[in-house]
Amino acid sequence: MHGRTSIRAVTLAMTGLFVVSACSAGGGPSQGTLAPPEKQILNVNDGTEPNSYDPTQQTYTYEAGVGREVFETLLKPNAQLTDVQPAAAEKFDISSDGLTYTFHLRSNAQWSDGKPVTASDWVYGFKHLLNPALGAGYVDPFFDTTIAGGADYGNVDVSSASAIDNYLNGLGLSAPDDHTFVIRLAHPAAFFKWVVTLWVAAPIRKDIVEQAAGGPFPSNDTTKPVQWANNASTIVGNGPYKISEIVSKDHATLVPNTHYWGGAPHLQKIVEWFIADANTAYAKYLTGDLDQLTVPLTNVDVVRTDPKLSKEAQIFPRLSTFYMAINAQRPPLDNPKVRMAFAKSIDRDKLAKQVQHGIQQAIMSYIPKGMPGYDTSDTAQSYDPAAAKKLLQDAGVNPAQLNKFTLLTRNTTRNKTINQFLVDQWNNNLGLNLQLEVVDSKTVTSRIRKGQFDIYGPDGWGADYPDQQDWFDVFFKGSCHTLNWGCPILPGYDDLVTKADSELDQSQRNKDYATAQRMLIDQAGVAFLYQDYEYDLIKPYVKGLTITPDDDQSLPGNFFWHDAYIVQH
Amino acid sequence: MTARRPGPGASLTERITAAGGSRVVSLTIYVLRRLLWMIPVVFFVIVITFVLMHLAPGSPWDRTSGRPLSPVVAEALDKKYGLNKPVFEQFLLYVSNVVHFDFGLSYQYQGKTVTSLIGEGWPYTATIGFLAFCLIAPFGIGLGVLAALRQNTRLDYALMGFATFAASFPNFVIGALMVVLFSVLMYKATGGNFYLPAGGFDLDDHLIMPVITLALLPIAFTARLTRASTLETIRQDFVRTAWAKGLTERLVVVRHILKNSLIPVVTTLGPTFAILITGSVIVETVFSIPGIGRAFVVAVTSRDYPMLLGTTVLFSVVIAVANLVVDILYVAIDPRVRVS
Amino acid sequence: MALPAAAIEQAIDWEVGEQQVGLWGDAWTRFRRNRLALIGLAIVLALIVVAVASPLLIRMGLLPDPFTQHVDTIEVGPGIGGHVFGTDVLGRDALSRLLIGSQVSLTVGILVQGIIFPIGLTIGLCAGYLGGRVDNLLMRFTDIWYAFPDLLFVLVVVSVWHVQGAWFVQLIPIFGAIALTSWVNLARLVRGQVLSIKEKEFVEAARSSGTPPFKIITRHLLPNSLGPIIVTLTFGIPQAIFLEAVLSFLGVGIQPPQPTWGQMVNDGYEAIYANPTAVVFPALAIGFTLLAFSFIGDGLRDALDPRMRK
């Protein structure tokens, strides 16, 4: 036990050094001799094949794993996640009223087939994303209180091409010249610069789309607009890599985009495998067929105690927090004292250090470490069984009243394990007799959307982008049954967060969000559990990685894979 | 044996033969009749599946992981795929498309048709399944007959032990154990020079472990079944007569025993096909093979209705054909058997 | 050579008559003489004793509690921390879980065959014996049943039929789900056997001598099909145990923390690199059960085989 803790401390410290040194390195290789081009191959496990190769239609992180490399957005987060940095746009201005964003595109930006990237490509891409007939999964940050004219998305008659065209042409998107792309917002939104870093906001080539569809098509067509993404040869992007081959459900191979404005990357091939089974992926790392791997939880101790593997493993924070949702529409769970009793009778340290093998970090607040707003000063939800019992008494609730409740659990091993631990904690610490209710995962989602549960979890939120607006909007009253499953009543919360969302002064925003976080914690809107960390094995010959907490899952460093390289080994 | 007039319950083939038609003709008509019967079978399967699909809780857009889908977008998707129409209308639309061999678009894999997805994955599943079958028939039957002829000897006990082992470990465990042994440990032992690949598909040593894993349980079951059936045949009088006459063992085996003991084995070869398809779900997951075995389970858990219906229709056709082949084999093995 | 019809009938009746006594009378004697069958019986009895006695032993403190989580010793190997077989993902004693798991797994594995047997047997016998249109309809019905997605069916059943409570209550929909999806194999097997046997001379003779169909079925067809039926049923035991584990993913299975052998194998699979014994011990338990029933099954078949009269 003693040995494990110190290893963890050392690796965390090393991670800090790692990030700092990689940032200062810039683009050139500085560690070890570069391997010859035929060895510059990176094998990674993306886990699942993207449901679509059209970036505007993607939503999951495993899809971003491919989409982010082949297409480039206007801006991207910097490595420290403190602000945005230029990407496809070399600079941008915001008008003084905060409503107009002018993006100055790079004049040397080219598509993978050599044609220049123009502002009209960007307009076409955004319209492709916002077309209601296509139902893109990740479109809501773009129409919901942001882009002017976007709010009507749900009311457009998708069977009528003219209605769709009216909607799309009424959006605040324009291209005054070939290298200027202007977006107008409906309300001021300081977080909008982060929204455009989402990888789905990509430019799309109208001529490629129409050619693959066999000619122009009306806006209400749902199948023709995505045909181009079914073949590697017609997927033309503006990112550092392009797709050379797709073997369905097996792997996708990325090769350098020689026309990329930032120069061709060092890596000659990135093979993204779609290996679903954790044991198989682990075996492949051991036999050298994979260069990166997220260590399955059951193998963490094996890796830690292995002399060779422990040196190749690193732990990284991720921008996601996990918590238990308690249904405040079922008395007596509407009483904040009762919810707080649940929150205070969980030994989070045991959960993180033992059950999760020390990979996760216990947390009693909402915003995770690694982004602004991380604040652990409010310890109202700390583990204190005696205080928890007293809270129940104060609320006038007899433990037997709570025994009719069940803990709705998704049918994955991880969820079952965590929830069995939690039920054990609650039963022992509060004198209850709660049961688990393990149900098929889809059915769980269907039930929580109808509010048909007592306690559900572990639920979590992962950052779309490192701005607090993204996090606190989850608990709006209006998000009840869509993101805010428990629907706790938090007096004053909605007004405060709405004000902070449209506030332009960053320090005032931070203050307001901090107050909102305290509300969440003190009212036990949810019972916080832990922040997610990732324990990855990376082969020592993979260099030049810049790893951020915002990286896509199990693909450490993929925001900056342009700079990665392999050394002689 | 006197010629019998076909009485009630007589098969169609009997009536044709009795009326003077040739055996080949009657067999062909039998096959055609069975193929025609596949149409109502498939239709009923579609009806039942359709009903069950729409009764199952959870819509295709309910996310099980990652960011939940906005309800506005979910509605847009419903409209896109026609899920906001009444169920009966959807059913009629589907059936009329199926008649034109159009199985629709997958909900999960955007823009790809069910036909193309099945077409992409089918060769992998078929290759592994076929190779496994090539192992099952000779090994299963051979080991079973051998064990029966040497009942209660050490060979028999060895077979029983092997069969028990194969049946008490589910095939994903066997698969994983093989990977540990032949990939990871072999890699360590030979310094990375020789090892079986831990997963993936290729027409080389990638096939060894998945095929063996898939074939193990059916071999065990077939062997035990053959053994039991052979034991019964051995004890029959005509076999004892053959022994008494002094015929060599091989002659006795081939001429008498095999023919008579194969009926139950042939019966299970039909469901063996089914096991190969369902077993391939697990083998394809463990060895990361992009076949359609997984596609079926994923279609159920993600409520990808068109994919679910498409794979179910395919499965029902395969089963019906397999059972037809089995029934024909019955007649081939033992001409006295009458199938309806 | 033509014997008088009456003499032929007489001879058949003797055969039939003698078979009747031989079938049940000295079957038990023959069974007792089969050493392996007795070993099998002993193992099964031992398993039943374990299933019944282990809760008592736990209450008396002779065995560790299988539900107590010792999060300090998670997933340790055999022998560590006083746990003879090691612990599981939450530090619960693996040996106790294995012993308690026998309750659910034995019940599911064995009793389910009791449901499959009559359904599969009846349908197989009817289809095989009656032939013609009945056979065609029954076999097409079987084709449909085989092809439609049982996973989906189970999902729908679960959403309509909620069960909470002790494990034997939770087992009811599981029995239904497993039996309903597994009877098809037995039916086809029985049908195949009947089709081949019913053309044999002794059946012809019995039929032409006016023996009623029921007696033909029970005295001629059934005893000669026993071998394959028994193999199918014994192999069905581990199948049912694993199916319960698969169903647990859909919520039809036994809710945790009640252990079952099938679920223990599934959990052990994930830890195969860290602690292989987690998967080996429950699989061995399942293997012993299968072995025991195979011995009993072989013994039964030998005991009931009409041609084994000595």
Image (cartoon, rainbow, N blue to C red):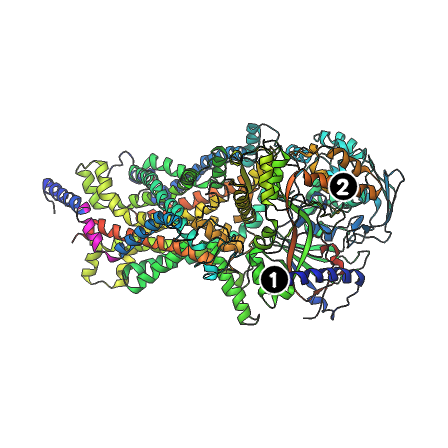
What is the secondary structure assignment of the residue under circle 1? helix
Where is residue A545, by image quadrant?
bottom right
Sort mark 2 into few (<14), some (14-19) or many (20+) by Cα contacts within 10 Å.
Answer: many
Q: Chain of mark 1?
A: A
Mark 1 residue type: Arg
- Say if labels 2 and 1 share a chain: yes
Q: What segment is highlighted magenta in the picture?
A: C23-35
* Residue tagged 2: A513
Observer able to see residue A252: yes
Which comes sooner in the sequence, label 2 or label 1? 1
Residue at image coords 21%, 53%: C32
Lateral position of residue B234 relative to residue A368, left or right: left
Task: Give the x, y percent position of residue A537.
Answer: 64, 61
Where is residue A227, by image quadrant?
top right
Front residue of A394/B133: it is A394
Mark 2 residue type: Tyr
Front residue of B275/A148: it is A148
Lateral position of residue A503 relative to residue A517, left or right: right
Give yes or no for residue A397 being in the magenta stretch. no
What is the secondary structure assignment of the residue under circle 2? helix
Task: Give the x, y percent position of residue A415.
Answer: 56, 46
Question: Dividing the image into 4 quarters, which one contains the N terminus of chain A?
Answer: bottom right
Lateral position of residue B75 relative to residue B239, left or right: right
Number of the label disc, if any, that sits on residue A243? none
Sort mark 1 into few (<14), some (14-19) or many (20+) by Cα contacts within 10 Å.
Answer: few
Lateral position of residue C200 relative to residue B188, left or right: left
* Residue tagged 1: A4
Task: Give the x, y percent position of residue A19.
Answer: 75, 59
